[in-house]
Amino acid sequence: AQKVTQAQTEISVVEKEDVTLDCVYETRDTTYYLFWYKQPPSGELVFLIRRNSFDEQNEISGRYSWNFQKSTSSFNFTITASQVVDSAVYFCALSEGAGGSYIPTFGRGTSLIVHP
Amino acid sequence: DTAVSQTPKYLVTQMGNDKSIKCEQNLGHDTMYWYKQDSKKFLKIMFSYNNKELIINETVPNRFSPKSPDKAHLNLHINSLELGDSAVYFCASSQADRVQETQYFGPGTRLLVL
């Protein structure tokens, strides 16, 4: 079973719409970290946010916000008033300590297309 | 200043050839990684090095050989290239091999095997 599930393969919106990208994870650890990365069409992977399992506070950074809910094992990402420059593939990742390997497991990504 | 750099950015080569991709980080990090991203954008870890020592080798064919001459460099050599090796290869680094560490990625090397 996937440890990080991004069920939305592709989302298409029109500029200025709000959009939420879902991320559901699976772990038995009590200490773990969740990440979001952005991969724009130019191809590089850009770190957006890291959240630890003990901090369920939502986070807002400009038009970006993240909703972490342990009860549903979700770490969703919302872009408010989307812009064309938000078009990218977004990856959610989980880092857990079980087995001594801390390599993050990445979801399969959600491709966001923002139309003008 | 580029934090994690890779060369070359593009690599087009024939089947059967041997090629290398270089990676350097100037972040002072202890841990470096190689990832492969396939055509469906799936990111899969290949190798991880901590302080020049191999700590993760994820069932990668032994045609792939990483080499870390020092903490700031992790190179990837590929022998006898096959069509299925065509992908984007990302180098990354993190402060240490710990659960809380954020990975910072290089720009990627787009490998096309003909």
Image (cartoon, coloured by chain):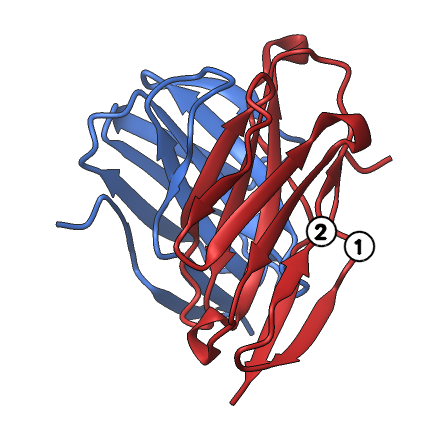
Chain colours: A red, B blue
Q: Earlier in the sequence, mark 1 or mark 2?
A: 1
Q: Quadrant of residue B91?
A: top left
Q: Position of residue A64 (x, y in %)?
A: 48, 54
Q: Residues within 10 Å of mark 2 (few under 14, many from 20)?
A: some
Q: CA distance from mark 1 to mark 2?
A: 7 Å
The residue positioned 60% from the left and 38% from the top of the image is A93
Left or right? Give the position of B49 relative to B86: left
Task: Tell me the kind of residue under disc 2.
Answer: Asp
Relative to residue B23, is residue A16 drawn left or right? right
* Residue B59 seen in the figure: yes
Q: Secondary structure at mark 1?
A: loop
User: Residue at the location (42% across, 74% down)?
Assistant: A85
User: At which x and y percent is residue A71?
Assistant: 79, 26
Report which residue position mark 2 lands on: A22
The answer to whether the residue labelled 1 contacts the one labelled 2, judged by CB atoms less than 8 Å apart, is: yes
Note whether residue B61 is visible.
no
Q: Position of residue A18 (x, y in %)?
A: 60, 68
Which subunit holds the residue at mark 2?
A: A
Does A96 appear above or below B14? Answer: above
Q: Give the number of the disc on residue A7.
A: 1
Relative placement, left or right, of A53 versus B23 is right
Q: Which mark is residue B32?
A: none
Query: B19 or A98, which is in the foreground?
Result: A98
Query: What is the x, y in percent for residue A58?
Result: 55, 36
Q: Residue furthest bottom?
A: A116
- In the displayed structure, B50 sits above or below B43; it is above
Question: Is label 2 in a helix, a strand or a loop?
Answer: loop
